[in-house]
Amino acid sequence: MDQPTKADDVEQGSGSAQGERACTDEEHAEAERPAYATINPSAMQIEMEIDPPPSRLELGRDAWLRFLGGPIHFWIGMIVLLLVIVDGAFFFFLLIGAHRMCRPRTDCEPRNWWYNWSIQFLNVLFTYLASISLPWRLSNAMHLFRSKRPSKAGLDLYGRATVEEIWYHLPQRKRRWIVACLTANSLTQYANQATRIVYYNYELQAAPPGSIWTNVFFVASMGFAAVGGFCQLREEIKLRRGHPERFPPHPLHIAAKYLRRVVCREKADGEDAEDGDAEDPRPLPDREESERRRCLRGLRKWLKNDQTSLDLWGL
């Protein structure tokens, strides 16, 4: 067995010393690195000094919005949205008489009983969404209309530059219009809920004045939500198209792209497949798994960028 030479010892000692210095340098750099550097870029804004300092009202607002922005409220919102779709479909079928409960199909029992309770339950769901989103809507309304902190495009509720959330990058005038519509939606929904409590059965809500008040506030609430939602969606789509490197595509666009690839991969020998699929040498299962992961990453990024946009709708 060869004995280690003096040169080998010197070389090993030099390598060990360099390794120790490298470790020491890395530890020193890690100690000096700001906390936000290891978390995410948006946390850097938390470290920035807020001028003027937050008031007690702003701190209370932040605590309440953090509570409402938790994951549990998101999933409750998803469940409520699903219930709205199911109950809304049930209400619509009863409205047009698409049932076999009794005759005449648009005015008979038990159809009228189910019709009344379906609209009552639907209003409760709408009132929940209006209530859970009202703190976000009022916070943005105060920021855009009354606060001394700047609210131009790109600035959050404290007037700090924000990189991620697309809502704050909408033009100030558009955000004011959207928030005004959404706040009016909440208020008219409360009025609508009150009329449903006063005119609580089918007979009361089917005859004047119940038929007038329940329909007036229902149409007003839906109208404000439709106008605000359409304007917000249009402005966000414009931003996504203009700055795709900053704002991820909408989930509908991600789903459409994924389905397009699914259809392409089923075509014989990839004759009509997209160029990217035709040039990809990987086996088909690997390409499918890669595309699924890409979709999930896109959805996660979308949720991060659209957090405030979803909060404005109680989701």
Image (cartoon, grey):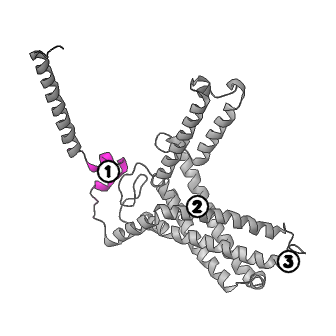
Q: Which residue is mark 1?
A: 44
| Residue 145, quarter of picture | bottom left
Q: Residue 107: which numbered mark, if any?
A: 3
Numbered disc in front, either 2 or 1: 2
Q: Which residue is mark 2?
A: 78
Mark 3: which amino acid? Asp
Point out residue 66 in the picture as x, y percentages from the top left corner: 41, 64
Mark 1: which amino acid? Met
Mark 2: which amino acid? Met
User: Which of the two residues, 99 or 257, is positioned nearer the viewer here?
Assistant: 99
> Which residue shows up at 72% across the image and 73% down it?
118
Q: What crowding class fits label 3: few (fewer than 14 Cα within 10 Å), some (14-19), or many (20 or more)?
A: some
Between the C-alphas of marks 1 and 3, the distance is 62 Å
> Which residue shows up at 28% across the image and 61% down it?
51
| Left or right of 3, for residue 86 | right
Q: Secondary structure at mark 3?
A: loop
Q: Earlier in the sequence, mark 2 or mark 3?
A: 2
Between the C-alphas of marks 2 and 3, the distance is 33 Å
Q: Which residues are magenta?
A: 32-53
> Which residue shows up at 55% across the image and 51% down it?
235
Q: Earlier in the sequence, mark 2 or mark 1?
A: 1
Pick out the residue farthest to the left.
Answer: 6
